[in-house]
Image (cartoon, coloured by chain):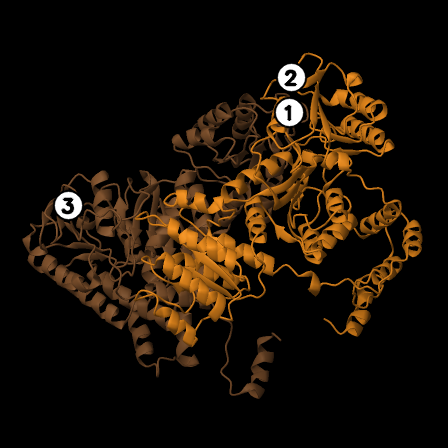
Chain colours: A brown, B orange
Amino acid sequence: MLINVISKTIDYLHFCKKFKLMINESLINPESIVIVGGSNHLNKPGGKLLSNLLRGSFKGSTSVVNPKETVVQNVKTYKSVEDIEFTDLAVLAIPAKFCLETITTLANKKKVKAFIIISAGFSEVNEMGIELEQEIVKVIEAVNGCLIGPNCIGILNNNYQGVFTTPIPKLDPKGCDLISGSGATAVFIMEAGIPLGLTFNSVYSVGNSAQIGVEEVLEYMDNNFDNSSSKIKLLYIEEIRNPVKFYTHARSLIEKGCKIAAIKAGVSSAGGRAASSHTGALATSDEIIRALFRKTGIVYCSGRAELITIGSVFTYKELTGKNFAIITHAGGSAVMLTDAISKGGLEVPEITSQSADDLLEYLYPGSSVANPIDFLATGTADQLGIIIDYCEHKFDEIDGIIVVFGSPGLFHVANVYKVLNVKMDICKKPIFPVLPSIINAQKEIEYFLSKGRINFPDEVELGKALCALYNTPKISDNKIDATLKIDEATIISTIKNAKNVFLTPPQVTPLIQFLGIPTTNGALVPPIEAAKTPTQESGFP
Amino acid sequence: MLINVISKTIDYLHFCKKFKLMINESLINPESIVIVGGSNHLNKPGGKLLSNLLRGSFKGSTSVVNPKETVVQNVKTYKSVEDIEFTDLAVLAIPAKFCLETITTLANKKKVKAFIIISAGFSEVNEMGIELEQEIVKVIEAVNGCLIGPNCIGILNNNYQGVFTTPIPKLDPKGCDLISGSGATAVFIMEAGIPLGLTFNSVYSVGNSAQIGVEEVLEYMDNNFDNSSSKIKLLYIEEIRNPVKFYTHARSLIEKGCKIAAIKAGVSSAGGRAASSHTGALATSDEIIRALFRKTGIVYCSGRAELITIGSVFTYKELTGKNFAIITHAGGSAVMLTDAISKGGLEVPEITSQSADDLLEYLYPGSSVANPIDFLATGTADQLGIIIDYCEHKFDEIDGIIVVFGSPGLFHVANVYKVLNVKMDICKKPIFPVLPSIINAQKEIEYFLSKGRINFPDEVELGKALCALYNTPKISDNKIDATLKIDEATIISTIKNAKNVFLTPPQVTPLIQFLGIPTTNGALVPPIEAAKTPTQESGFP
């Protein structure tokens, strides 16, 4: 692993010198798109992708290559790629075996510099597929072009929606950037997030990552980061082929104010086997991934539900401390949430000030303000507003507010959610809404989401997400040692001297020390009997 | 804690001698119900409860007491409880201050033996409320009656739906029995479970548990358990006032084949404060609860989402081993699920038999049968059927099957879910369905649920639930020592001899040994210096 990391470091250092960015403007914001394999069949990827594109926000020109049709979906249709005019972006939805020839024509004769291959049947299948993929990448890189896929659903952003799947999420410049090593997983993440109110700025399905993987998308986002960029990145990763590139750009984005949550799948040995057959990824141990994420400042997630909850938390105002007020009309939810928050290292401090007594006077008898603030099943919208005002202005010890408010089905709670929505705008402290009554208050929750809000239907899942975020080291906790200088020549010569890929302990130790990794004193010993003396010297049993 | 447990044991032993069961047939299956405080206002508890009752399955006679109305919701209405005829069950939805007088009349003059008090304003509010509650219980116990509440939503079962809340879940004799110390939490659990297909056999909202708490409901279920009983119990608990009773009946139910999952809220100190203000519960440490649950065989849950997922797993066929086959057309979900299952101690073994090679021939090129069995985005319903047949009949190493099948939105997947539904009936091995496309396949999922199925929309949440279940000790692992005889007299005399509530070490040690709790050798020593010799004798540092 260490050798792998170091050799990747070297690759990357060389790479940076050239500074050849893969993703180009033609991919991100094309003026013209050709769909090779676009058809009238909306139950096939080429047909559906064209349909999504035409129904979306794309303002440029669209054309289709399809030898069997004259006009496809009312779009200019060519019999062959030989016939097309210049286009910024080509999307291929044709069998794998035709892709190399098609791309060669497009790249060399038509000067196309951006490609998306939807088709499967490449490196995920067999050796021949790997070769085919490599050939295609060579052709594209020879013209300084870029490639998304193959074996992916495509990409979508505010400029165009180039995916063959539904749903197309609500596009929002402040929404999530989703980068996924699995197309279906990207779809399922959107399907799980959209009903909660989650919006998206872009979705990149990188598929087999023949040229562009999750790392390269992060690199592009980092190098092109500006005030208009979304600050929320959600990742589904099956393989980190270049950990240094991944670390460098993810960390840089976080330093620029971004928040990143990620699933790295394939961290168990069985999961690694699964990932390998899926996108050809290699297994990585969970410990290494967790360490990498901690070091980078990425919030570790193990599944879609977690990723979406964390992503939703990212959309809210930032928490500046660890103390929560929990406001509720439903005691049980507040008790479970208090447990979840306390277990995870955050706090629900008791509120005992004079202000608390003052607040109590506005509430019905039997209410409690000790925190959780329970204003009873009969609590009103007005009372909620007053409680939030107290939390915002009078209870200085409170850093964040969670409001749990559902409905037993007796009356509408729209007025409560209106007050909540206004307070969420006005208050400086973040307010997280838990609206659990997805049946009884369905319409009121729809209203709330229509205001651009995201709901957390389960209080404990929210509590766990807040704690996961809190327990991910901030970059300020985790500064890189600026005095550490990497001497490329030493690393290269050490690795070159390695016999049979393995480094001997005397070779490894200087490398480890050189990279600034703290170590205990080591000692090289012959078989077990000889281990006694150095063990005693170390002072440990 | 120990003294508390022991003294509860004694209470319970005394109690068992009398064997006076609290819950009676009038509460469970009344022939007549009077709603005191029933009204025409459907936005008030008394009005809505009556409405729910009238629209539900109740076959008996319903009447109302309301001094201000002549006829309420077309039901026979009395001005005063003095005027009513005999009734099996009285539900009170009137202010707390009127409850004692009303119940005294009903119990003493009208021979009513079952009561539900919906109203709040009792022990959860103040000392006066505690006294009022105790007075009411005295009156009811004097006539050998039973009481649910106060401060609850009521109860519902197949006989009648006596709650003031919606939704009323689909009633199913094989559905869950839900017992909740919080009415709103019961509602939110139903709201979260119903959309997934979860059904209910009964819901008990025990509120302040003035007389009947979660333990007493379990006791009733245990003592009345027969072939027609549901075997699934979901609990939301804020206080276990009688751990011995809880343990005895929960364990007995599990020995009879029941499955129990529970949330014990208020396990952190802040959570304990929250629970105390909610239903007057005392805090219990998380470790004690986890130990109690493990000993009893109850699956520990920390929130509603977990409880519902575990409850849903309970409804499926029982797993007889630890080896899963994961069948999918969407690689990413299978990778995450494989990780989740492997991390939790279950296994996704590699399948390498000749049968595996045979199966591969039925699938499209690029499919993998090594497990996960990935039959690609283009996989068909027929192929799914064949794969499941192989898992059921040919792959002997497989104990359970998980099928992850969503939709990218290109075509309908109803035929896939039909095959899945049939196989779930026919196969002996349990098959768990993960249908993640809650948007793209909404209608097909509705069809699937209409067949009485429950969906797991998130594969990792299912994986975690399966592991939580697997890691909860089976009762066979955990037999009580039948030779252990509790000598009540010794326990009582020891406790009576305790000075200032504390037991000295020489008093505690025999008690601990007596209860069969294994201990290391102890030694009583004066201050720290003197501790050296016995420490050395113990052989530990």
Which residue: 16% across, 57% down? A145
- Residue A231: image x %, image y %? 35, 44
Do the numbered discs 3 and 2 sit on residues whose CB atoms are within 8 Å? no
Which residue position is annotated with label 1? B50
Looking at the rendered structure, the kind of residue marked 1 is Leu
Which residue position is annotated with label 3? A72
Q: Quadrant of the N terminus of chain A?
A: bottom left
What's the chain of the residue with tag 1?
Answer: B
The image shows residue A442, relative to residue B2, as above or below, that is above
Measure the C-alpha gap from mark 1 to mark 3: 61 Å
**Residue placed most toward the observer, A540 or B353:** B353
Mark sitting on residue B72: 2
The image shows residue B294, relative to residue A452, as above or below, that is below
Q: Is residue A334 visible?
A: no
Q: Badge 1: how crowded within 10 Å, few (<14), some, or many (20+)?
A: many
Looking at the rendered structure, the kind of residue marked 2 is Val
Q: Badge 2: how crowded within 10 Å, few (<14), some, or many (20+)?
A: many
Do the numbered discs 2 and 1 sit on residues whose CB atoms are within 8 Å? yes
User: Image check: A104 left or right of B466?
Assistant: left
The image shows residue B377, relative to residue A497, as above or below, that is above
- Residue B150: image x %, image y %? 72, 30
Q: Badge 3: how crowded within 10 Å, few (<14), some, or many (20+)?
A: many
**Residue placed most toward the observer, A423 or B150:** B150
Is label 1 in a helix, a strand or a loop?
Answer: helix
- Write down the quadrant of residue A157 in the picture: top left
Which residue: 43% across, 49% down? A307
What's the chain of the residue with tag 2?
Answer: B
Looking at the rendered structure, the kind of residue marked 3 is Val
Q: Quadrant of the C terminus of chain A?
A: bottom right
- Which residue is most to the front? B59
What's the chain of the residue with tag 3?
Answer: A
